[in-house]
Image (cartoon, rainbow, N blue to C red):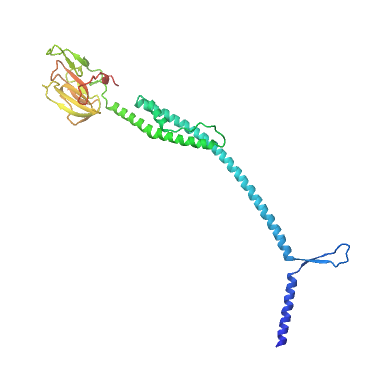
């Protein structure tokens, strides 16, 4: 039994020694001292160590090359990004200049709208100037160019919001009101073109019936025409009153309400062609020429009124086209 154990240990010890010799296999370098009889020094270099050193050198070299290439690529990208930013900044400045020109054009248009809607157009410029904070006047350097453009863009945005948001709203709203007022405003004669003639104007005149020596104030304009001549509305509106009493001062007459308190009256009709509450357009026939009421001949008495005030001079409205 002991013999078997000795053989087993001897065999495995021999294998261990062979493996150890193989593991330390490599190169041996003998170093002989010069001018000396001393024995040479033996330096053993293992193959694994040689492989490790060679692998380390190759890996360091490759890593350095990769890092150098990556650094060069990053530099190229940085230069390209800087060039792109330069182009963007240049385009931004040009775009800002273009937008400033557009805002100036918008300002001119708003002032034109304001002139159409209201004569005092200076109010718009003062309104914008009070609300826009202009950029400070400082020397522009390449470093402050972007900051200056950003401040200008902020002020430009604020100004455009004021012009297009507030001023445009009010100006266009006023233009709309003026357009609507022009649409509902009485215009022209209460008869077809070329028919009838003015027989009595607006203002003071002698009493045609001779009832007073002081005369009377005529609150409208009389248009003489043949009996039965159509009388037309001078503006769109709604019939607010019709009187068929031929013995009243106005005789048979029609009163039409237009808008903004404006109304027109057509008196001394021989016959009415509309009813109360009826909507009429400009040029619709509302009655026919007669001489009912206090009239000395066939004509239509035409008045323009504002609210409950007496009739105003219709001549400016008749001259409107």
Q: Considering the image in quadrants, where does the C terminus appear?
A: top left
Q: Nearer the viewer, residue 244 or 33?
A: 33
The image quarter in which residue 8 lies: bottom right
Seen in the picture, residue 168 relative to 296 is either above or below; the reply is below
The residue at the far top in this view is 213
Could you tell me which residue is drawn at 31 percent across and 29 percent down? 177
Left or right placement of residue 319 versus residue 244 in this view? right
Q: Is residue 233 above or below residue 149?
A: above
Q: Residue at x 67, y 53 (%)?
A: 64
Q: Which residue occupies 74% across, 78% down? A: 14
Q: Residue furthest left?
A: 247
Quadrant of res 104: top left
Q: Nearer the viewer, residue 263 or 233?
A: 263
> Residue 307 appears at what percent x and percent y?
21, 26
Does 24 sit left or right of 202 as displayed?
Answer: right
Residue 247 position within the rendered picture, expressed as x and y whole percent measured from the top left: 10, 21
Q: Nearer the viewer, residue 276 or 225?
A: 276
Which residue is at the front of the view, 237 or 309? 309
Estimate the x, y position of residue 242 in percent, counting from the top left. 16, 27
Residue 54: x %, y % from top left = 72, 60
Q: Quadrant of the N terminus?
A: bottom right
| Left or right: 114 as drawn, with respect to 289 | right
Q: How many marks?
A: 0
* 276 over 223 or under it: above or below: below
């Amino acid at each position: 039994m002991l013999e078997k154990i000795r053989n087993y240990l001897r065999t495995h010890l021999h294998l261990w020694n062979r493996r150890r010799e193989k593991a330390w296999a490599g190169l041996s370098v003998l170093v002989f001292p010069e001018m000396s009889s001393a024995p040479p020094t033996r330096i053993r270099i293992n193959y694994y160590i040689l492989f490790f050193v060679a692998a380390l050198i190759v890996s360091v070299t490759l890593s350095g090359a990769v890092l150098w290439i990556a650094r060069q690529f990053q530099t190229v990208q940085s230069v390209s990004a800087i060039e792109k930013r330069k182009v963007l900044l240049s385009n931004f400045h040009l775009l800002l200049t273009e937008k400033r020109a557009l805002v100036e054009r918008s300002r001119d248009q708003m002032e034109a709208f304001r002139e159409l809607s209201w004569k005092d157009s200076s109010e718009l410029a003062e309104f914008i100037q009070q609300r826009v904070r202009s950029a400070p006047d400082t020397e522009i350097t390449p470093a402050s160019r972007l900051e200056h453009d950003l401040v200008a863009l902020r002020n430009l945005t604020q100004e455009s919001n004021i012009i297009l948001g507030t001023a445009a709203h009010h100006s266009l709203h006023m233009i709309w009101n003026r357009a609507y007022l022009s649409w509902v405003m009485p215009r022209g004669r209460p008869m077809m073109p070329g028919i009838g003639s003015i027989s009595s104007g607006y203002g003071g005149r002698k009493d045609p019936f001779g009832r007073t020596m002081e005369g009377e104030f005529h609150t409208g304009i009389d248009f003489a025409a043949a009996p039965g001549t159509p009388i037309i509305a001078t503006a769109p509106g709604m019939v607010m009153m019709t009187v068929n009493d031929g013995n009243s001062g106005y005789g048979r007459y029609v009163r039409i309400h237009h808008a903004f308190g404006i109304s027109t009256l057509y008196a001394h009709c021989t016959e009415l062609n509309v009813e109360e509450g009826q909507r009429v357009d400009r040029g619709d026939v509302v009655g026919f020429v007669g001489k009912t009421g206090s009239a000395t001949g066939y004509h239509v008495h035409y008045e323009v009124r504002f609210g409950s005030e007496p009739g105003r001079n219709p001549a400016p409205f008749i001259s409107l086209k």
